[in-house]
Every structure is written in structure tokens, then in C-alpha cells.
Image (cartoon, grey):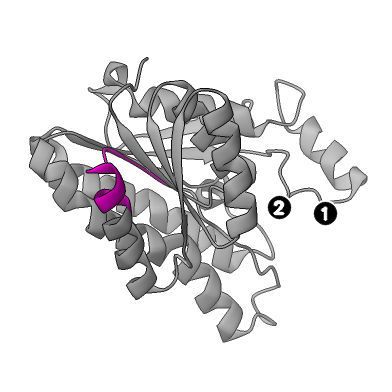
Amino acid sequence: MSLSGRVALVTGASQGIGRACAEELGRAGATVALAARNTEKLNQVAQAIIAAGGTAGTFSVDVADEDQVKATVKAAIQQFGKVDILVNNAGITHDQLVMRMKRADWDAVIHTNLTSAYLMIQQVIPSMLKQRWGRIINITSIFGQIGQAGQANYASSKAGLIGLTMAIAREVASRNITCNAIAPGFIETAMTSGFSEEFKQNAIKMIPLGRVGTADDVAHAARFLASEEASYITGHVLNVNGGMLMG
């Protein structure tokens, strides 16, 4: 599943699933444009990719800011010539029961998790149309499929990503561009590190494979969907959840 000659843009690439995806795509031969807010962490990821023999560049961006998104995609294309692969991974949480949830927390999560994906897709599509090849991969969540108490904003944003994935897939399929989503289950990342041990053990009981997932589990799925071998898959939600949700 070589990605040699391809350019991948990964949002939220400074840590967790985004970093794992970026490094995996780099190992597969892609040049990686790393996008996130934390420049220091981005530089660390870039150094790791370069040390492994790959090519990477860093782009500081708040994906909820439309002007910054436009500037970032423009800069990535200027530096690398194109964008073949987009991984929309950037995401945040502001958890609260809906009756207590502040409008600002709703808006922040929707803008960062969902609106940013729309903005990124809109900006990279011309490059993909020009070369008549593209891979768009949206990182959603099992909670966008089954919901989660205290996460009305997060679950809504991730469910919205699934709808966006299918709509974009239909719009661009005739130009040899695919759009798919990956729905991770319980993955050990910085975002989940604050959960109590009791919560984690209860979660594991719900996972048939009997373990928490890793960021690399998600990254391997992203590499496949970005490859030529996945050329006949579009509008699909690939569940990476250890069997936590089936069907």
C-alpha cells in the first residue's frame, strides 16, 4: 500500500490519532503536511517523520478559523505542489449534560469537529479535481453512531461528519475522489487519559476483543483508505472499535 508521490494533509497532527496517522502515512511514502495549533508538538512529529526517512512540513492553524484554514491549504500546496490525501482529525470535547451545556461549548465543538472538516474539504477539492485523484478521510467516533450522555455536542459533531462523508462521496466520486470515515471506539489517547480506571475497565467489558484500542489501530485503517487498494470504497464508515459496535 505504497503512497509514494502522494501528499497528505493531516489536521490535529500534533498528538494522538492525528500524529499516528501522519507518521503512518509518512512511513507509507507520503509527504505529510502537519496541521495543528501547537507548533512545538508539530515540529516533534515532523522530526520523527524525517528521522524515519520521510518528508514533512508543519502548518500552525486553528481549524475553526476559516481564514486560517484557507491560508494553511494554500501554503501546503505552495510548498508541496498539491494535496492528494486529507485526514480530518482535529477534534475537541467540552462535556456537560445538555440542560447545563453552555451555547459557547456547543458552538466550539461543532465548529472544531464538524465545520472545520467542511472548510478543509472545500479548500483541497480543487487540487484533487485537477489531478483527478483524491482521498478524503474523516475521523468520526463510535459516539457519533450510538450517542453518549454528557456529549450532545461531541456526538452531534461526529454524527454530522458521517453525513458529510456520504454527501461528499456522492459529489466527487465521478472524479476518482473517495471520501470515507473512520469511527474509532475506545482509543487510548490524551483525550481519554483523564478517564477513571473504573470507567476504562467498564468500557473494556463492552469490547469483545477485550482491550482498549491504540492510535496505531486507527492509523492503519487510514493508510488503507488512503491507498490505491481502497479505490472502490467510498461513502463508507470503517469501524475501528474492537467489536464494541457491530452491524
- The amino acid sitting under disc 1 is Gly
131 sits left or right of 104 in the view = left
* Distance (Cα) linking label 1 and label 2: 7 Å
Which residue is labeled 2 in the image?
191
In-front residue for pair 134/171: 134
x and y percentages locating residue 123 in the rendered image: 24, 58
Q: Secondary structure at mark 1?
A: loop
Question: Quarter of the image holding residue 46?
Answer: top right
What's the mark number on residue 226? Answer: none
x and y percentages locating residue 152 in the rendered image: 58, 66
> Crowdedness of circle 2 by 10 Å Cα count: few (<14), some, many (20+)?
some
Q: Residue at x 64, y 55 (%)?
A: 40
What's the mark number on residue 194? Answer: 1
x and y percentages locating residue 148 in the rendered image: 64, 56
Q: Inspect the magenta stretch and tell me whether residue 82 lies in it.
A: yes
Task: Classify 216 as above or below 91.
Answer: above
Say whether marks 1 and 2 touch (CB < 8 Å): yes
Q: Residue at x 65, y 80 (%)?
A: 101
Task: Classify 232 as above or below 175.
Answer: above
- The amino acid sitting under disc 2 is Met
Question: Quarter of the image holding residue 204?
Answer: top right
In-front residue for pair 182/73: 73
User: Which stretch appears magenta?
Assistant: 76-87
